[in-house]
Image: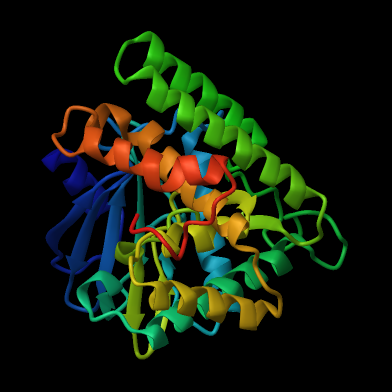
Amino acid sequence: MEKIIQESLERYDFKNPKLEFIRHNENITYKVLDELNTYVLRVHKPIEGFSLGIHQRDQEIFKYIESEMQLIDYAKRCMNTPIQKPVKNKMGEFVSVLQDGTCVTVLEWVQGDTINNIPMTETIGKTIGTMIAELHKCFNELENNEDNRPVKNVLNHDIKRYMYDQNMLDVIEVELSKIIRNGLMEKDKVDIMKDAVRVIKGIMDELDEMQNMSGIVHADLSPSNLIFSNEKIVPIDFSLSGYGFYYMDIGLIVSQYKDNNIKRSIVSGYEETMQKEIPLRYIEAFIALGVILFIVCQYDKVRTQDWFDGAVKRWCETIFNPLINGKSFVYESNQ
């Protein structure tokens, strides 16, 4: 790993850089401090046990990483929020490909604290909802340019991103079947998840019949990916962003909180900015999808951990079964 880090640093115009490890999940992430600025360095190597196998890629990984940087660059220019600025390497490229094929990207650092490190309030919750709505509006403008050709003119070519749609749900069902065949989880719990997937698919079909329900979404909104900076909320880490239903982003962040007032404040901020009300069952469908995505993508990493079996049981009782039976749960249960 030291060789990879050294080669990564050499690709950029850093001045006496010093590194601080941040985390390792879908990427290995470092904070870089040099004589002039502070940056985020991302080595695109997932942690062992983390899988994006549910995404049937039709392009090499480089294209997905490059398009993520282009999306961030576009959001930086169209939003009234201090989005991280992508940094080009010495060759003027957004993505550095190392000798072993590893991809590396750099972004400018956003000063502030992740919202999991500050006291959460209803005011902050409403600001989060407003920011998500503005992000969706920004990307909607990107997709619906003046020539009415999806995602082309602004960036000069198609944006290759992950797909959070019904086809992905079909792949998830296959992956859940593999878990049963390998005897890695009780069949009744997996069957409940499969039934939940079918309900989610039905809601996606319903949303497909409406206008402006889908587009580019962040797809990984959590307190650790939201920075509180100068009274604004800044989304970071668009690694998993892709095409999906807008309410997915609301469901993902709402699921992170137990306080009903905080949940309502997030939803309220979004609804007021978008000027439309969200039926709770739509939010709940994507809360369930977020949990299922976590299970499927990180199963090999978490299945042997002591807390996991109890968590699956709780999710079945408080999220999946209520969704299947048409019982609202977002403001009633502690996920």
Nearest the eye: 149 or 97: 149
Question: Can residue 289 be seen?
Answer: no
Residue 73 falls left or right of residue 199: left
Give percent across and percent down for residue 77.
57, 77
Which image quadrant: the N terminus? top left
Which image quadrant: the C terminus? bottom left
Quadrant in which residue 253 is drawn:
bottom left
Give percent across and percent down for residue 250.
52, 63
Give percent across and percent down for residue 192.
47, 30
Residue beneath the point at 52% across and 33% down = 55
Quadrant in which residue 300 is drawn:
top left
Residue beneath the point at 27% across and 41% down = 311
Nearest the eye: 321 or 200: 321
Looking at the image, residue 227 lies above or below residue 42 = below
Residue 128 falls left or right of residue 153: left
What colour scheme was applied to this rendering of the protein?
rainbow
